[in-house]
Amino acid sequence: MKKTAVSFLIIYFAFSAHLSFAQEDIYKQIKTLYDNCDKKETPGGFAAAVIKDGKVIFKKAYGFSNQENNIAFTTATVADYASVSKQFTGFAIAKLITEGKLQLDDDIRSYIPEMPDFGETITIKHLLYHTSGIRDWVGLVKISGRYLEDVITDDFIMKLFLNQKELNFKPGERFQYSNTGYFLLANIISRITGQSFREWTNENIFKPLQMNSTHFSDDYSEIIFNRAVSYKKDINGNFINTPGNLEGYGSSSLFSTLDDMIKWVLNFGSKEIADTVVWNMMLKPCILNNGQKVDYGFGLDLGERFGLKSFGHGGSWSGYLSQVTFYPEIKLASVLIANRNPSGVYVDEKMVKLIMNNKEIQKKSDAKVEVSDPQEVVVDQSLLQLYEGVYKFKDFIFIAEKVDDHLVMHLPWGEECYKVYPESNERFFIKGADLGFSFLRDSNEKVNHMIYHWKGSDWPPALKMDSDLSGFRDIQDLCGIYTSHELKTSYTLKIQNNHLIATHMQNESVWLIRIDKDHYTGTKWWFKDLIVIRDENERITGFRVYADSENIQNLKFEKE
C-alpha cells in the first residue's frame, strides 16, 4: 500500500512538473510575441493578457503611460477602452430585458419622446444591432467644425441627434455602425432606472466584479488617477500628445485597466452578475429585415478568426487602442490596451496558433521579422513637386504630397500619413515595410500614373487625376456658401490655385477632387464624397455629404 502511494506521488509530481514546464514554455513564447512589438523608439506603451481555461497564462505591460515624465505603463494603468464599452452597454440592456424593464421591440420614442420624427419606428433592437439608420455622432461632430480632441459633452452629442432630420436608411434594412445608437441606449438605461449610466454600471457590474479602477466617464474634466496619456501620429508621421475630452458613455468613454478587464473576461458567462440567459442573449446575431444574418451581437462582433469561432470588440479614441477577444471553442481570450495609435501590437493570430500547438507557426512567431529597406538616395526637390497629386486606383484613391523636404502618401479621408524615401528618381519606399510606390511618365514627360508595390506584387497602375479646374466652365457656379441646418454650420466652396476647396471657420480645409460632373471626393474621412444637388433648371442648390464607412449619408447643405 505504501509502495503504491509513493509511486502515485512520484507520477503526480512528475506530471505536475511537466505541466509547469509546459506552461512556462507557453508563457515564454507568448512573451516573445509581445516583446517583439515593444518598440523602444515609439512613445507610449501597452499592456496585454492571455487567459486560457479560466486562468491568466500571460500578463505584461510595456513602455510608458506618460512619456514626458518617464512613468511606466503597468497592468494597473488606466486607459480609455473606447468602443469596448459597447459590450457593457449590451450587457446592461440584456439584464434589464430579463428584469422585465424593457423589450427589444420597444419603440425608443417611448423613452426619448423629444426625438425627431424620422417617419420610421426605431426600436431598442435597431440601436443594439447598428441597424437604426441613425447617423454616427463621431462624423457629425467633425463635420460640425469641431476637432475630436475638443471637449465633446454628452449634452452636445444629444443635441446633434435631436437636430437630425433624416436617417441614413430605413431601420432594419442595413447594418451600419453607429456610435449614436449606443449613446442613446445608455441614455435610455438612465431614464428607465432613475440612475446615471455610470451609477448603474458601477452598482451592477464593476463593484460586484471588484473592477475598482473602472468607470464610464461622464465628466471630461475629472481627475483620473494613474491615467495614461495618449499618443498618435500626425500628418508628418511624428507621434504627438492627443487629449481625449469625451463624454460619449455607452458607445465609448470606458476607463479601465488591464487587471480589471481580466476580471470581466474571467466572469463573462458566469452567474456572478447575471443569469445564463443574459449572456446567451448578448451572443445572438443580428437579423436584417430581409432575413440576412449579420455577425454582430449586443456590443460584440461575432464570427470567426483564424478558423475559430470568436466574439469580442475593439476600440479606438484619440491615441488609445483596445481589443478584447474570446475564442470559446478553445477557452481562450486575449486583452490588449495601448496608449499609442498605431500600436502595432495585435498578435492574436500567432498567439492562437501557438496555443493550438502549431510548431511551424511557433517557429515563425518566435523570430522577429526584419524588413530590409532599399538604399536611400538623394533626389532633386523639384521631382517631389511633380509627383504631388491624386492617384485613382479601382477602389480607392491615394494622395501624394510634398511636406517640407520629403514626400508623404495618404488616403484622401485618412489622417495617417506615410513618409516615403527615394530609392531612385522614380521609386520610393516606406521604411520598415515591404511596400513602395513608383511614378510613371508619358511621352511628354508628364507624370500620369503611379504603381503600388506590396510584398513583391505590383498593383495595376493608378491614374493621376487632373485636379486643375481651369478647364471646367461650370465650376464657378459651385462656389459659394452652403449651410447645414441640421448641424447649424456652414462651408464655403471656392477656387484656390485652380483647386476646389471647402473651407470652414474652425475646421480644416478639404481639397475636393472631381470624379465626374456632380461628384467630388474629399481629402478628409468626414468629407469623403460630395454630391451636387441641382434643380429642374440645372441650377446648383446645394450638396450632400457622405463620410467614410458610410455612417454619415445624405447630409444636406443648402446654397445661400
Image: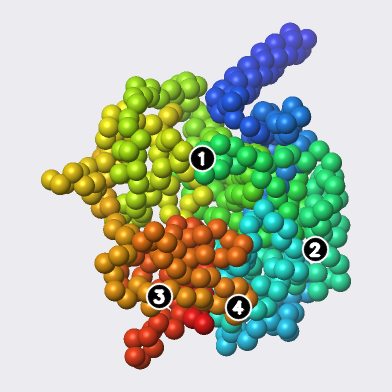
- Which residue is the site of mark 2? 197
Q: In which quadrant will I find the N terminus?
A: top right
Q: Secondary structure at mark 2?
A: helix
Q: Say whether residue 58 is visible.
A: yes
Residue lying at 67% horizontally and 28% vertically, measured from the top left: 63
- In the image, taking residue 349 as reference, residue 7 lies left or right, namely right
Q: Nearer the viewer, mark 2 or mark 3?
A: 3
Nearest to N terminus: mark 4 or mark 3: 3
- Quarter-of-image position of residue 195: bottom right
Would you place residue 523 above or below residue 106 in this image? above
Nearest to N terminus: mark 2 or mark 3: 2
The percent coordinates of residue 64 (x first, y second) are 70, 30
- Which residue is the site of mark 3? 478
Disc 4 from disc 1: Cα separation: 34 Å
Callout 3 crowding tier (Cα within 10 Å): few <14, some 14–19, many ≥20: many
- Which residue is the site of mark 1? 236
- Which residue is the site of mark 4? 486
Callout 1 crowding tier (Cα within 10 Å): few <14, some 14–19, many ≥20: some
Q: Are marks 1 and 3 in contact (CB under 8 Å)?
A: no
Residue lying at 49% horizontally and 81% vertically, measured from the top left: 559
Nearest to N terminus: mark 1 or mark 3: 1
The amino acid type of the residue labelled 1 equals Asn
Looking at this view, name the residue that lies furthest to the left: 443
Q: Say whether residue 125 is visible.
A: no
- In the image, taking residue 549 as reference, residue 387 lies left or right, namely left
Q: Nearer the viewer, mark 2 or mark 4?
A: 4
Disc 2 from disc 4: Cα separation: 27 Å
Number of numbered callouts drawn: 4
The amino acid type of the residue labelled 3 equals Leu
